[in-house]
Image (spheres, grey):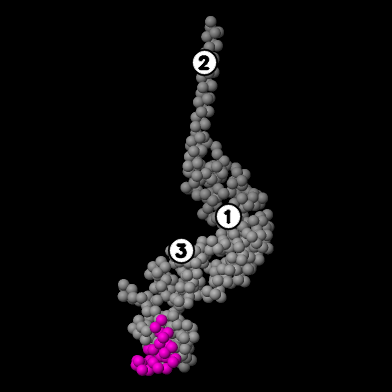
Protein backbone atom coordinates (compact mmCIF):
# COMPACT_ATOMS: atom_id res chain seq x y z
CA UNK A 1 0.00 0.00 0.00
CA UNK A 2 1.66 3.19 -1.11
CA UNK A 3 -0.13 5.68 1.16
CA UNK A 4 0.25 6.29 4.88
CA UNK A 5 -2.62 6.46 7.35
CA UNK A 6 -2.46 8.68 10.38
CA UNK A 7 -2.09 6.55 13.51
CA UNK A 8 -4.93 8.40 15.24
CA UNK A 9 -7.25 7.71 12.29
CA UNK A 10 -6.13 4.10 12.31
CA UNK A 11 -7.01 3.74 15.99
CA UNK A 12 -10.36 5.45 15.44
CA UNK A 13 -11.28 3.17 12.54
CA UNK A 14 -10.20 0.15 14.51
CA UNK A 15 -12.64 1.12 17.28
CA UNK A 16 -15.41 1.78 14.75
CA UNK A 17 -14.83 -1.61 13.12
CA UNK A 18 -14.88 -3.28 16.53
CA UNK A 19 -18.13 -1.49 17.49
CA UNK A 20 -19.74 -2.54 14.20
CA UNK A 21 -18.71 -6.16 14.82
CA UNK A 22 -20.13 -6.08 18.36
CA UNK A 23 -23.42 -4.67 17.08
CA UNK A 24 -23.63 -7.40 14.45
CA UNK A 25 -22.87 -10.16 16.97
CA UNK A 26 -25.61 -8.85 19.27
CA UNK A 27 -28.05 -8.82 16.36
CA UNK A 28 -27.35 -12.53 15.90
CA UNK A 29 -28.32 -13.35 19.46
CA UNK A 30 -25.18 -12.96 21.58
CA UNK A 31 -25.46 -11.26 24.94
CA UNK A 32 -23.65 -7.95 25.29
CA UNK A 33 -20.86 -9.44 27.44
CA UNK A 34 -20.38 -12.32 24.98
CA UNK A 35 -20.20 -9.97 22.00
CA UNK A 36 -17.66 -7.74 23.77
CA UNK A 37 -15.52 -10.74 24.76
CA UNK A 38 -15.61 -12.18 21.23
CA UNK A 39 -14.60 -8.85 19.67
CA UNK A 40 -11.81 -8.42 22.21
CA UNK A 41 -10.35 -11.82 21.27
CA UNK A 42 -10.72 -11.15 17.53
CA UNK A 43 -7.97 -8.53 17.26
CA UNK A 44 -6.41 -10.03 14.13
CA UNK A 45 -9.77 -10.11 12.40
CA UNK A 46 -10.39 -6.47 13.33
CA UNK A 47 -7.02 -5.45 11.86
CA UNK A 48 -8.07 -7.34 8.74
CA UNK A 49 -11.24 -5.20 8.67
CA UNK A 50 -9.19 -1.99 8.89
CA UNK A 51 -7.09 -3.15 5.93
CA UNK A 52 -10.30 -3.87 4.01
CA UNK A 53 -11.53 -0.36 4.69
CA UNK A 54 -8.29 1.16 3.46
CA UNK A 55 -8.59 -0.77 0.22
CA UNK A 56 -12.30 -0.06 -0.22
CA UNK A 57 -11.94 3.66 0.41
CA UNK A 58 -8.50 4.24 -1.08
CA UNK A 59 -9.59 7.46 -2.84
CA UNK A 60 -10.93 8.93 0.41
CA UNK A 61 -7.70 8.07 2.24
CA UNK A 62 -5.67 9.84 -0.44
CA UNK A 63 -7.61 13.05 0.23
CA UNK A 64 -6.85 12.78 3.94
CA UNK A 65 -10.51 12.63 4.97
CA UNK A 66 -11.57 10.40 7.86
CA UNK A 67 -14.21 7.75 7.18
CA UNK A 68 -17.65 8.29 8.66
CA UNK A 69 -19.46 5.72 10.78
CA UNK A 70 -22.02 5.21 8.01
CA UNK A 71 -19.30 4.50 5.46
CA UNK A 72 -17.64 1.98 7.77
CA UNK A 73 -20.90 0.20 8.56
CA UNK A 74 -21.92 0.16 4.90
CA UNK A 75 -18.69 -1.62 3.99
CA UNK A 76 -18.56 -4.10 6.89
CA UNK A 77 -22.13 -5.24 7.56
CA UNK A 78 -22.65 -6.98 4.18
CA UNK A 79 -19.27 -8.67 4.69
CA UNK A 80 -20.30 -9.92 8.14
CA UNK A 81 -23.57 -11.26 6.79
CA UNK A 82 -21.75 -13.19 4.04
CA UNK A 83 -19.33 -14.68 6.60
CA UNK A 84 -22.18 -15.68 8.93
CA UNK A 85 -23.87 -17.50 6.05
CA UNK A 86 -20.64 -19.16 4.94
CA UNK A 87 -19.48 -20.36 8.37
CA UNK A 88 -22.83 -20.91 10.08
CA UNK A 89 -22.28 -22.37 13.56
CA UNK A 90 -18.52 -21.92 13.16
CA UNK A 91 -18.74 -18.14 12.68
CA UNK A 92 -17.53 -17.32 16.20
CA UNK A 93 -14.64 -19.73 15.89
CA UNK A 94 -13.72 -18.14 12.56
CA UNK A 95 -13.44 -14.75 14.27
CA UNK A 96 -11.43 -16.06 17.23
CA UNK A 97 -8.91 -18.04 15.18
CA UNK A 98 -8.62 -15.72 12.19
CA UNK A 99 -6.74 -16.11 9.85
CA UNK A 100 -6.31 -19.82 10.65
CA UNK A 101 -9.25 -22.24 10.47
CA UNK A 102 -9.36 -24.10 13.82
CA UNK A 103 -9.39 -27.86 14.08
CA UNK A 104 -11.81 -29.68 16.35
CA UNK A 105 -9.03 -30.45 18.83
CA UNK A 106 -8.37 -26.77 19.41
CA UNK A 107 -11.78 -26.27 21.02
CA UNK A 108 -10.69 -27.64 24.39
CA UNK A 109 -10.28 -24.31 26.15
CA UNK A 110 -13.27 -23.34 28.28
CA UNK A 111 -13.71 -19.85 26.91
CA UNK A 112 -13.64 -21.11 23.35
CA UNK A 113 -16.10 -23.86 24.18
CA UNK A 114 -18.40 -21.22 25.62
CA UNK A 115 -18.16 -19.26 22.41
CA UNK A 116 -18.86 -22.38 20.39
CA UNK A 117 -21.98 -23.18 22.40
CA UNK A 118 -23.14 -19.61 21.94
CA UNK A 119 -22.48 -19.75 18.21
CA UNK A 120 -24.90 -22.63 17.82
CA UNK A 121 -27.71 -20.23 18.72
CA UNK A 122 -26.81 -17.76 15.96
CA UNK A 123 -29.58 -17.40 13.42
CA UNK A 124 -28.58 -17.70 9.82
CA UNK A 125 -29.76 -14.97 7.45
CA UNK A 126 -32.73 -15.98 5.33
CA UNK A 127 -32.09 -16.53 1.63
CA UNK A 128 -34.46 -14.64 -0.64
CA UNK A 129 -35.82 -15.74 -3.99
CA UNK A 130 -33.94 -12.86 -5.57
CA UNK A 131 -30.67 -14.45 -4.48
CA UNK A 132 -29.92 -11.95 -1.68
CA UNK A 133 -30.08 -12.48 2.05
CA UNK A 134 -32.27 -10.91 4.70
CA UNK A 135 -31.10 -10.22 8.21
CA UNK A 136 -32.57 -12.71 10.76
CA UNK A 137 -34.31 -9.96 12.75
CA UNK A 138 -36.04 -8.68 9.63
CA UNK A 139 -36.90 -12.21 8.54
CA UNK A 140 -38.61 -12.69 11.90
CA UNK A 141 -40.54 -9.42 11.57
CA UNK A 142 -41.74 -10.42 8.11
CA UNK A 143 -43.77 -13.17 9.76
CA UNK A 144 -45.95 -10.45 11.32
CA UNK A 145 -47.10 -8.91 8.07
CA UNK A 146 -44.26 -6.68 6.84
CA UNK A 147 -43.40 -6.99 3.18
CA UNK A 148 -39.89 -6.64 1.77
CA UNK A 149 -40.33 -3.02 0.70
CA UNK A 150 -41.55 -2.09 4.17
CA UNK A 151 -38.60 -3.94 5.71
CA UNK A 152 -36.16 -1.97 3.55
CA UNK A 153 -37.84 1.31 4.47
CA UNK A 154 -37.78 0.32 8.13
CA UNK A 155 -34.02 -0.27 8.09
CA UNK A 156 -33.50 3.01 6.26
CA UNK A 157 -35.54 4.86 8.86
CA UNK A 158 -34.24 2.98 11.90
CA UNK A 159 -31.08 0.91 11.21
CA UNK A 160 -30.78 -0.23 14.83
CA UNK A 161 -33.75 -2.57 14.38
CA UNK A 162 -31.39 -5.21 12.94
CA UNK A 163 -29.32 -5.16 16.14
CA UNK A 164 -32.25 -6.20 18.34
CA UNK A 165 -32.07 -9.79 19.54
CA UNK A 166 -35.04 -11.90 18.53
CA UNK A 167 -35.08 -13.91 21.74
CA UNK A 168 -34.38 -11.07 24.19
CA UNK A 169 -36.07 -8.11 22.49
CA UNK A 170 -38.38 -8.71 19.55
CA UNK A 171 -40.19 -11.90 20.57
CA UNK A 172 -40.83 -10.95 24.26
CA UNK A 173 -42.16 -7.50 23.33
CA UNK A 174 -44.40 -8.88 20.59
CA UNK A 175 -45.71 -11.47 23.04
CA UNK A 176 -46.52 -8.64 25.48
CA UNK A 177 -48.39 -6.76 22.77
CA UNK A 178 -50.40 -9.87 21.94
CA UNK A 179 -51.22 -10.34 25.64
CA UNK A 180 -52.56 -6.77 25.72
CA UNK A 181 -55.09 -7.79 23.07
CA UNK A 182 -53.45 -6.44 19.94
CA UNK A 183 -54.35 -8.67 16.97
CA UNK A 184 -51.37 -10.29 15.30
CA UNK A 185 -52.50 -8.67 12.05
CA UNK A 186 -51.80 -5.23 13.60
CA UNK A 187 -48.31 -5.96 14.93
CA UNK A 188 -46.66 -4.77 11.70
CA UNK A 189 -48.39 -1.38 12.07
CA UNK A 190 -46.71 -0.91 15.45
CA UNK A 191 -43.33 -2.01 14.09
CA UNK A 192 -43.53 0.53 11.28
CA UNK A 193 -44.87 3.39 13.42
CA UNK A 194 -42.49 3.04 16.37
CA UNK A 195 -39.59 0.60 15.89
CA UNK A 196 -37.84 2.22 18.89
CA UNK A 197 -40.38 0.44 21.07
CA UNK A 198 -38.58 -2.85 20.45
CA UNK A 199 -35.31 -1.57 21.88
CA UNK A 200 -36.79 -0.94 25.33
CA UNK A 201 -36.43 -3.20 28.31
CA UNK A 202 -39.51 -5.27 29.00
CA UNK A 203 -39.13 -5.19 32.78
CA UNK A 204 -37.43 -1.81 33.25
CA UNK A 205 -39.48 0.25 30.78
CA UNK A 206 -42.56 -1.25 29.16
CA UNK A 207 -44.24 -3.10 32.02
CA UNK A 208 -43.72 -0.25 34.53
CA UNK A 209 -45.08 2.28 32.01
CA UNK A 210 -48.16 0.17 31.37
CA UNK A 211 -48.74 -0.27 35.11
CA UNK A 212 -48.34 3.48 35.71
CA UNK A 213 -50.77 4.42 32.94
CA UNK A 214 -53.30 1.93 34.30
CA UNK A 215 -52.93 3.57 37.72
CA UNK A 216 -53.93 6.86 36.03
CA UNK A 217 -57.14 5.30 34.75
CA UNK A 218 -56.28 3.73 31.38
CA UNK A 219 -58.46 0.62 31.15
CA UNK A 220 -56.83 -2.66 30.17
CA UNK A 221 -59.53 -3.40 27.63
CA UNK A 222 -58.47 -0.34 25.60
CA UNK A 223 -54.75 -1.09 25.29
CA UNK A 224 -55.05 -2.64 21.85
CA UNK A 225 -56.76 0.42 20.40
CA UNK A 226 -54.39 2.84 22.15
CA UNK A 227 -51.14 1.16 21.15
CA UNK A 228 -52.09 0.60 17.52
CA UNK A 229 -53.10 4.27 17.31
CA UNK A 230 -50.04 5.63 19.14
CA UNK A 231 -47.39 3.03 20.06
CA UNK A 232 -44.99 5.81 21.07
CA UNK A 233 -47.02 6.20 24.28
CA UNK A 234 -45.11 3.28 25.79
CA UNK A 235 -41.74 4.88 25.03
CA UNK A 236 -42.29 7.89 27.31
CA UNK A 237 -40.89 7.78 30.83
CA UNK A 238 -42.94 8.21 33.98
CA UNK A 239 -41.72 11.78 34.55
CA UNK A 240 -42.98 12.91 31.14
CA UNK A 241 -46.36 11.23 31.64
CA UNK A 242 -46.70 12.64 35.16
CA UNK A 243 -45.97 16.15 33.86
CA UNK A 244 -48.95 15.93 31.50
CA UNK A 245 -51.10 14.34 34.24
CA UNK A 246 -50.30 17.17 36.67
CA UNK A 247 -51.10 19.77 34.00
CA UNK A 248 -54.54 18.25 33.39
CA UNK A 249 -55.25 18.23 37.11
CA UNK A 250 -54.18 21.87 37.23
CA UNK A 251 -56.74 23.01 34.64
CA UNK A 252 -59.57 21.36 36.55
CA UNK A 253 -59.90 17.92 34.97
CA UNK A 254 -60.90 15.33 37.60
CA UNK A 255 -58.37 12.52 37.98
CA UNK A 256 -61.16 10.07 37.13
CA UNK A 257 -61.43 11.64 33.65
CA UNK A 258 -57.71 11.71 32.80
CA UNK A 259 -57.63 8.01 31.94
CA UNK A 260 -60.49 8.63 29.49
CA UNK A 261 -58.51 11.43 27.82
CA UNK A 262 -55.40 9.26 27.54
CA UNK A 263 -57.53 6.51 26.02
CA UNK A 264 -59.16 8.74 23.40
CA UNK A 265 -56.09 10.84 22.63
CA UNK A 266 -52.85 9.17 23.79
CA UNK A 267 -50.95 11.69 21.64
CA UNK A 268 -51.47 14.29 24.38
CA UNK A 269 -48.57 12.72 26.28
CA UNK A 270 -46.25 13.76 23.44
CA UNK A 271 -47.24 17.43 23.74
CA UNK A 272 -44.82 19.74 25.53
CA UNK A 273 -46.31 21.14 28.74
CA UNK A 274 -44.45 24.43 28.36
CA UNK A 275 -44.65 24.87 24.55
CA UNK A 276 -48.12 23.48 23.84
CA UNK A 277 -50.34 22.64 26.78
CA UNK A 278 -49.86 25.61 29.06
CA UNK A 279 -49.93 28.37 26.38
CA UNK A 280 -53.01 26.81 24.76
CA UNK A 281 -54.86 26.63 28.07
CA UNK A 282 -53.97 30.25 28.87
CA UNK A 283 -55.17 31.49 25.48
CA UNK A 284 -58.54 29.74 25.57
CA UNK A 285 -59.08 30.92 29.14
CA UNK A 286 -58.42 34.50 27.95
CA UNK A 287 -61.33 34.30 25.46
CA UNK A 288 -63.77 32.79 27.93
CA UNK A 289 -63.38 29.09 27.15
CA UNK A 290 -62.87 26.61 29.98
CA UNK A 291 -59.57 24.84 29.11
CA UNK A 292 -60.45 21.82 31.26
CA UNK A 293 -63.76 21.31 29.46
CA UNK A 294 -62.04 21.75 26.09
CA UNK A 295 -59.21 19.34 26.96
CA UNK A 296 -61.76 16.68 27.88
CA UNK A 297 -63.86 17.24 24.73
CA UNK A 298 -60.99 17.76 22.28
CA UNK A 299 -57.53 17.02 23.73
CA UNK A 300 -55.99 17.11 20.25
CA UNK A 301 -56.63 20.87 20.17
CA UNK A 302 -53.79 21.26 22.67
CA UNK A 303 -51.28 19.99 20.15
CA UNK A 304 -51.86 23.04 17.94
CA UNK A 305 -49.72 26.17 17.82
CA UNK A 306 -51.43 29.16 19.41
CA UNK A 307 -49.83 31.61 16.96
CA UNK A 308 -49.92 29.53 13.77
CA UNK A 309 -53.24 27.70 14.16
CA UNK A 310 -55.48 28.92 16.97
CA UNK A 311 -55.31 32.73 16.78
CA UNK A 312 -55.91 32.83 13.00
CA UNK A 313 -59.16 30.88 13.46
CA UNK A 314 -60.34 33.26 16.18
CA UNK A 315 -59.51 36.17 13.89
CA UNK A 316 -61.42 34.56 11.03
CA UNK A 317 -64.64 34.26 13.06
CA UNK A 318 -64.29 37.81 14.42
CA UNK A 319 -63.87 39.12 10.87
CA UNK A 320 -66.98 37.17 9.84
CA UNK A 321 -69.01 39.10 12.40
CA UNK A 322 -69.10 36.67 15.34
CA UNK A 323 -68.41 37.93 18.85
CA UNK A 324 -65.98 36.41 21.35
CA UNK A 325 -69.02 35.14 23.23
CA UNK A 326 -70.31 33.48 20.04
CA UNK A 327 -66.94 31.80 19.49
CA UNK A 328 -66.83 30.61 23.08
CA UNK A 329 -70.31 29.12 22.73
CA UNK A 330 -69.42 27.37 19.48
CA UNK A 331 -66.26 25.83 20.95
CA UNK A 332 -68.14 24.72 24.04
CA UNK A 333 -70.73 22.98 21.85
CA UNK A 334 -68.25 21.68 19.26
CA UNK A 335 -64.87 21.12 20.92
CA UNK A 336 -62.99 20.12 17.77
CA UNK A 337 -63.81 23.38 15.96
CA UNK A 338 -60.22 24.66 16.15
CA UNK A 339 -58.74 21.43 14.79
CA UNK A 340 -60.19 22.04 11.31
CA UNK A 341 -58.15 23.64 8.55
CA UNK A 342 -58.95 27.28 8.03
CA UNK A 343 -58.20 27.22 4.30
CA UNK A 344 -59.62 23.80 3.42
CA UNK A 345 -62.61 23.60 5.76
CA UNK A 346 -63.78 26.59 7.76
CA UNK A 347 -63.48 29.28 5.09
CA UNK A 348 -65.16 27.37 2.20
CA UNK A 349 -68.03 26.24 4.43
CA UNK A 350 -68.54 29.73 5.79
CA UNK A 351 -68.51 31.19 2.26
CA UNK A 352 -71.27 28.78 1.27
CA UNK A 353 -73.24 29.36 4.46
CA UNK A 354 -73.18 33.13 4.05
CA UNK A 355 -74.76 32.76 0.61
CA UNK A 356 -77.78 30.62 1.56
CA UNK A 357 -79.55 33.13 3.75
CA UNK A 358 -79.24 31.45 7.15
CA UNK A 359 -78.48 33.48 10.27
CA UNK A 360 -75.24 33.56 12.29
CA UNK A 361 -77.22 32.71 15.41
CA UNK A 362 -78.26 29.37 13.90
CA UNK A 363 -74.61 28.55 13.26
CA UNK A 364 -73.74 29.47 16.86
CA UNK A 365 -76.45 27.06 18.00
CA UNK A 366 -75.17 24.32 15.66
CA UNK A 367 -71.39 24.75 15.01
CA UNK A 368 -71.23 21.05 14.15
CA UNK A 369 -72.05 22.32 10.66
CA UNK A 370 -68.27 22.63 10.12
CA UNK A 371 -67.84 18.92 10.76
CA UNK A 372 -69.91 17.80 7.75
CA UNK A 373 -68.68 17.42 4.19
CA UNK A 374 -69.49 20.45 2.07
CA UNK A 375 -69.80 18.53 -1.20
CA UNK A 376 -71.27 15.25 0.03
CA UNK A 377 -73.66 16.47 2.74
CA UNK A 378 -74.21 20.20 3.04
CA UNK A 379 -74.72 21.23 -0.58
CA UNK A 380 -76.85 18.22 -1.67
CA UNK A 381 -79.22 18.54 1.27
CA UNK A 382 -79.56 22.28 0.92
CA UNK A 383 -80.36 21.75 -2.77
CA UNK A 384 -83.19 19.30 -1.91
CA UNK A 385 -84.71 21.75 0.55
CA UNK A 386 -84.42 24.64 -1.90
CA UNK A 387 -85.92 22.54 -4.70
CA UNK A 388 -89.12 21.87 -2.78
CA UNK A 389 -89.21 25.16 -0.89
CA UNK A 390 -88.89 23.37 2.45
CA UNK A 391 -87.64 25.17 5.56
CA UNK A 392 -85.67 22.99 7.98
CA UNK A 393 -83.32 23.97 10.81
CA UNK A 394 -79.58 23.35 10.33
CA UNK A 395 -79.35 20.62 12.96
CA UNK A 396 -82.13 18.51 11.44
CA UNK A 397 -80.90 19.13 7.91
CA UNK A 398 -77.42 17.73 8.61
CA UNK A 399 -77.50 15.43 11.63
CA UNK A 400 -80.09 12.96 10.32
CA UNK A 401 -79.13 9.86 8.36
CA UNK A 402 -79.83 9.62 4.65
CA UNK A 403 -82.92 7.47 5.30
CA UNK A 404 -84.23 9.80 8.00
CA UNK A 405 -83.60 12.86 5.83
CA UNK A 406 -85.49 11.21 2.95
CA UNK A 407 -88.45 10.49 5.22
CA UNK A 408 -88.45 14.08 6.51
CA UNK A 409 -88.49 15.38 2.96
CA UNK A 410 -91.31 13.03 1.97
CA UNK A 411 -93.35 14.01 5.03
CA UNK A 412 -92.84 17.71 4.39
CA UNK A 413 -93.70 17.36 0.69
CA UNK A 414 -96.87 15.39 1.57
CA UNK A 415 -97.88 17.99 4.14
CA UNK A 416 -97.28 20.76 1.63
CA UNK A 417 -99.39 18.86 -0.92
CA UNK A 418 -102.26 18.53 1.54
CA UNK A 419 -102.04 22.19 2.40
CA UNK A 420 -102.09 23.09 -1.30
CA UNK A 421 -105.09 20.79 -1.84
CA UNK A 422 -106.85 22.37 1.13
CA UNK A 423 -106.26 25.81 -0.25
CA UNK A 424 -107.53 24.71 -3.66
CA UNK A 425 -110.68 23.18 -2.13
CA UNK A 426 -111.24 26.34 -0.16
CA UNK A 427 -110.94 28.40 -3.33
CA UNK A 428 -113.41 26.11 -5.13
CA UNK A 429 -115.91 26.42 -2.27
CA UNK A 430 -115.66 30.20 -2.44
CA UNK A 431 -116.21 30.15 -6.19
CA UNK A 432 -119.29 27.93 -5.84
CA UNK A 433 -120.66 30.21 -3.15
CA UNK A 434 -120.19 33.27 -5.32
CA UNK A 435 -121.96 31.55 -8.27
CA UNK A 436 -124.90 30.65 -6.04
CA UNK A 437 -125.23 34.18 -4.77
CA UNK A 438 -125.14 35.56 -8.30
CA UNK A 439 -127.92 33.17 -9.37
CA UNK A 440 -130.05 34.23 -6.43
CA UNK A 441 -129.52 37.86 -7.36
CA UNK A 442 -130.63 37.28 -10.95
CA UNK A 443 -133.67 35.41 -9.80
Residue at the (41%, 86%) spot, across then down: 117
Residue 204 in the magenta stretch? The answer is: no
Q: Is residue 94 magenta?
A: yes
User: Residue 335 occupies which quadrant of the picture?
Assistant: bottom right
Magenta part of the protein: which range?
93-121
Vertical comparison of 418 with 177: above or below: above
Is residue 329 placed above or below 138 in the rendered structure? Answer: above
Nearer the observer, 117 or 5:
117
- Marks 2 and 1, how far apart at CA: 62 Å
Residue at (53%, 25%) from the top-left corner? 423
Image quarter (top left, top right, bottom left or bottom right) of the N terminus: bottom left
Instruction: Classify 10 Å Cα crowding around label 2: few (below 14), some (14-19), many (20 and above).
Output: few
Q: Look at the numbered discs 2 and 3 and tell me whether their residues touch, using CB distance below 8 Å.
A: no
Count of residue discs = 3
Which residue is identified by label 1? 336
The circle on residue 432 is 2
Mark 2 or mark 3: name the one nearer the start of the chain: 3
Packing grade of label 1 (10 A; few <14, some 14-19, many >=20) is many
334 or 224, nearer to the observer: 224
Residue 282 drawn at (x, y percent): 67, 61
Amino acid sequence: MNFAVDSRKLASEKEEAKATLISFLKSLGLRNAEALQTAKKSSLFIMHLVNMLQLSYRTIYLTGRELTTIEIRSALLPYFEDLAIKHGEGFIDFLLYFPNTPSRQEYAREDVNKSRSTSKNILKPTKLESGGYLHPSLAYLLTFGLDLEQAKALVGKFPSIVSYSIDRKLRPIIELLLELGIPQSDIHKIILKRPQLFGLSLNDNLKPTIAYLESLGVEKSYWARIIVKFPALLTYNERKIKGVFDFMLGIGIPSSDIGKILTRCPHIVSYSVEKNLRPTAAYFKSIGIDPGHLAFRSPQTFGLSVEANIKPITGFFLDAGFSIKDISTMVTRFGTLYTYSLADNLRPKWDFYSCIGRSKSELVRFPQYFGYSLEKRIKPRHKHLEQYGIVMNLNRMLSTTEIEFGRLLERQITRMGLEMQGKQDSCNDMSNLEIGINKMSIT
